Image (spheres, helix red, strand yellow):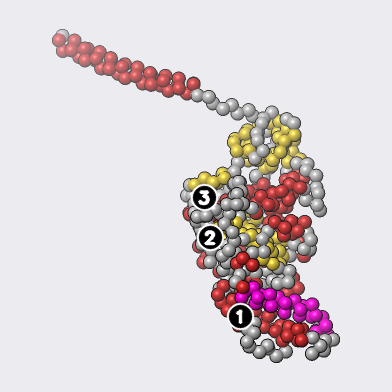
Amino acid sequence: MMDTAGSRGAGTGANAGSGYNRGSIWCELLQEYKARAQEELPLVLEGKLSRMVGLTLEAVGCQAPVGGRCDIVAPDGTRVESEVVGFAGEKLYLMPKRDLHGLVPNARVIPVGRAGEVRVGPELLGRVIDSEGMPLDGKGAIGAREPVPLGRATINPLSRRPVRDPLDVGVRSINSLLTVGRGQRLGLFAGSGVGKSVLLGMMTRFTTAYVIVVGLIGERGREVKEFIEDTLGEAGLARAVVVASPADHSPLMRLQGAKLATSVAEYFRDQGKDVLLLMDSLTRYAQAQREIALAIGEPPATKGYPPSVFAKLPRLVERAGNGDHGQGSITAIYTVLAEGDDQNDPIVDAARAILDGHIVLSRELAESGLYPAIDIEASVSRTFPQTATPEQSVMALRFRALYSLYRQNQDLISVGAYQSGSDPRLDEAIAYWPQLIAYLGQGMDERIGLDQSLSGLAELLDPTLPAPEA
C-alpha cells in the first residue's frame, strides 16, 4: 500500500510539472501572438487584368507606383512578372518581363513592391549574366551579396574629376589620333557589318582598364555566344562582366540590361577601379524604350521616336564618367547603329550631342580591306586637347591634314587628272598616303600600346626625315 501511494504521489508530481511546462509554453505563445497582433501589417490590394493590347497590359482595382513590380496570376497558377510603366485614371499600364502565354481576362494583379535592385560584387568577374543578374554561363550561382539600385542619381557635375589621363585601348589609330581619356564617353557609330563588334573585342582584350563591363543589348543570340568565345576569348572574359539581353527578350528586359551593366560598372568605380564599359548597342536601348512608349500611347515625334527616348538617353549616359576624388572611373564606349549608314539618324544625332566624342566606321574603308575601318575625318575626341601632349597634338593635326587632302582629291588622282607638281601640299599627301593607310590598319589579334602608337606616329611624321617619294 505504501508503495502504491508513493507511486501515485510521484505520478501526480510529474503531471503537475508537465502541466507547469505547458502553461509556460502557452504563455509564451500568447505573448508572441499579442506582439504580432499589435504590428501594423501592410494591406495588399489586389486588382485584376482588364485589357491586353500588344505588349501593354491594363489593370484596375489596385495601385502601384511607376517602376513598381506586379505579379499577374492566372487561374491555372501561371505567374507573369511585370512592371508599372504608366497610368491613366484608375488604370495601371503594365509591361511584362516574360512571355504572356496563359494569361486570361480578370487574372489577379498583385503589387509586390518596387523594382530596381540587384546584387553585385567581385564574384561577377568572368561571368555572363542576364538582365536580372542570373547566370547564363552554366557555372553555378554567383554569390554576389551587395545590393545596388538599377537607377542611381547622377553625380554632381562639380564633384566629378576632370578627364586628364589617357586610357590605353590597344588600338593604334585610337591611341594616337583619337586618344581616349579615363572617364570619357565615346560613341562608336557604324552601319551593320563594318566591324564594330570586332573593334569592341579588341579594346576589351587590349585595354589597361582594371575591369571591363560588356552590355550586349538587343543583339542576336548567336552574336552573344560568338562575341564571348571568339571575340572576347578566355583572357578577355577573365576580367570582364558580360550582361546579355538578346533581341528576343522583352523591351523591358533590354532596358534593364543596359541599366544593370551601368550599375555593375558603378560598383567597381566606387571601389576605386578604372572600368571600361562597352555597350552594344545604344540604338537597341532606344528602340526598346520606343516600343514601350508607343505601346502605352505616347505620341511619336522624330521619325517615330517618342520624346521619352531622348530623355532616357542622357540619363543612362551621364551615369558613366569619372567619380568623385578617391573613386575610380568609367570610360564608356557605346555603339550606335547608323541605319542605312545615315549619320543624321535621330539616335545618331542625339548620341553625338550628349557624348564626349565619336568614332565613325566607314563602309567604304571596310570594303577596301582596311580594318579597323575608322574614318579619321569624321571622327573626333572632345577630350583630346586635355589628354594629348602638345607634340602629339601637332603630329595628329598634320596626319589629319595629309589624310584629308588626299581623300578630297582621290578621284582626280585615281583617273590621272592631277599633274604632279601642281600643288606641293598635295604632292606631299600623295607621297605619304601608303604610309598613312598602313599606319591605320591593324590586325585583330595585334596589340599596339599607347607608347608604341605615339612612337610610330612620330617616326612616320618626323620633320627631320625626308618625305617619302611618291
Residue at x-position 65% and y-position 44%: 97
Mark 3, Cα crowd under 10 Å, few <14 / some 14-19 / many 20+, is many
Residue at x-position 59% and y-position 61%: 163
| Residue 76 disc label | none
Dominant SS type (magenta): helix
- From the top left corner, tell me how far across and down residue 263 is, in percent: 57, 51
Give the mark nearer the N terminus: 2 vs 1. 2
Q: Which residues are magenta?
A: 391-415
Residue 207 counted in the magenta span = no
- From the top left corner, tell me how far across and down residue 69 is, in percent: 62, 38
Residue at x-position 71% and y-position 52%: 286
The vertical placement of 44 against 292, above or below, is above
The N terminus lies in quadrant = top left
* Mark toward the viewer: 2 or 3: 2
Residue under label 2: 274
Give the mark nearer the N terminus: 1 vs 3. 3
Could you say whether the residue bearing mark 3 is in a helix, strand or loop? strand
Residue under label 3: 120
* Foreground pick, 300 / 353: 353
* Mark toward the viewer: 1 or 3: 1
| Residue 458 disc label | 1
Distance, label 2 to label 3, CA atoms, is 17 Å
- From the top left corner, tell me how far across and down residue 113 is, in percent: 59, 36
Are dots 2 and 3 in contact, CB under 8 Å? Answer: no
- From the top left corner, tell me how far across and down residue 192 is, in percent: 72, 65
Give, as a three-letter code, the residue at label 1. Ala
The C terminus lies in quadrant = bottom right
Give, as a three-letter code, the residue at label 3. Val
Distance, label 1 to label 3, CA atoms, is 44 Å
